[in-house]
Amino acid sequence: MSLQTTGPAGSQAPDPWRYRWTVLGVATFTQASSGFFVGGIGALGVHLQRALELSTTQLGLLVSAAQLVPLAGLLVAGELLDRHSERWVVGIGACVVAVALGAGSLAPGYGALLVALLLVGAGYSTVQPGGSKSVASWFHASQRGFAMGIRQAGLPLGAALASAVLPLVAEEFGWRATLLTGGFVALLGAGLFMGCYRRPPAPAGPFDREPSVPLAAQLRARLRMLREPSAVKIMLSGTSLISVQTGVGVLTVLHLHRTSSVDAGRAALILVASQGAGVVGRICLAAWSDRSGAGRHGIVLVCMVAVIAGLAVLMTPAGRAPVVASGVFVWLGFFGFGWYGPWVAYVAEAAPPGKTGFALGLAMSVNQIAIVTVPPALGLLVDLTASFTPAWALLCLLTVVALSVTAVAERRTR
């Protein structure tokens, strides 16, 4: 992928592929803006519990509500992305997020807020696979991991900004104003993506739209994808690490506030630091996967080992000390959020030609099962036991099992 092309008269004309950096910036911003409010729910935990008289389980259900529709929506979005331009699929989805959050600011209570967040999830279904496919189609394999890492850093970046801003908005104007803020930010992302994105100036390639083939053949091809050895590694590593990521996002502030006696404001800042570490992790780990002899999934395995170590510390008496707990959450932010960059690049490259959108949608929809079920399950464990240790133990066990199975699959593949 050269940086210059030769014009008709032999002069050097600007290379159209340079626009890939604009596409990367736009996709990253849209990712951050669409997930802004939901990413900040964890930092709003103390405020929402006071204002709406919520249990930890109910707080976890708010996160699950925003992720429920994508269980099926990601598959639908993947099919749409294989047939239509990312500009409109992603842009319209981000608009739905903005409208749903605006409507949610008028919710009379907890039940109506849950419904609004269900609609947020419907819109968000297109943003994750759409943004990933747009970046994958613009970048060569030698830079794809790095680019995907930057793009995937949009999620913890948006969550970190939300964790810093939304508690201040809630203190000053109330929880309803936080939804309006999130809706406005999502609308900015939708407008920018629809206004700036365009398809790459490339001949037909592995990330182009799916060719016209009979429906029965398409279904057979999709079933074959599920039997591939790479699918086992994708599904297990993704669900275990997304469970850790979700648990850290929801429970960090509550753990620090209740167990380590850190006030809510300072605990939210530690969550910001954890999510900021996730931004760095997604970029650095993905860039490492471009050059590592262990391959992209080898880096994911490293993240799983690091996550197990961090969770083990949280279960010890040292994990209740404010300094130690804060350091562990930053560690978990780097590895427990950073895994997503190399993981998504691996999914995109493992997909059959013409089925990148579906492969991304399928992998992300499997992750959604964990995203939907883990927050209320962890919240229920905390409510029943009055302790965070069982919650961290469950996440640690899930990761250990997934690491064992995927490490064996990795050796067999090699």
Image (cartoon, rainbow, N blue to C red):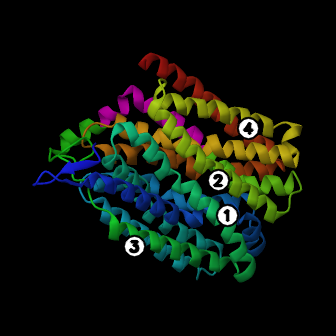
Mark closest to the chain's N terminus, 1 or 2: 1
**Image quadrant where one finds the C terminus:** top left
- Please state which amino acid type lies under the numbered disc 3: Gly
Q: Position of residue 169 (x, y in %)?
A: 69, 76
- Residue stretch in magenta: 223-243
What separation in Å lies between label 2 and label 4 (alpha carbons)?
16 Å
Residue on which the image places disc 4: 311
Magenta part, dominant SS: helix
What separation in Å lies between label 4 and label 3 (alpha carbons)?
40 Å
- Please state which amino acid type lies under the numbered disc 4: Leu
Checking the image for residue 191, the label placed there is 3
Q: Position of residue 96 (x, y in %)?
A: 43, 71
Q: Is residue 349 left or right of residue 374?
A: left
Residue count near mark 4 (Cα–Cα under 10 Å), binned few <14, some 14–19, many ≥20: many
Residue count near mark 2 (Cα–Cα under 10 Å), binned few <14, some 14–19, many ≥20: many
In front of the other: 128 or 70:
128
Q: Nearer the viewer, mark 2 or mark 4?
A: 2
SS state under label 3: helix
Checking the image for residue 85, the label placed there is none
- Residue at position x 59%, y 79% from top? 105
The answer to the question of whether label 2 and label 3 lie on touching residues, with beta carbons closer than 8 A, is no
- Residue at position x 37%, y 51% from top? 135
- Residue at position x 55%, y 41% from top? 284
Mark closest to the chain's N terminus, 1 or 4: 1
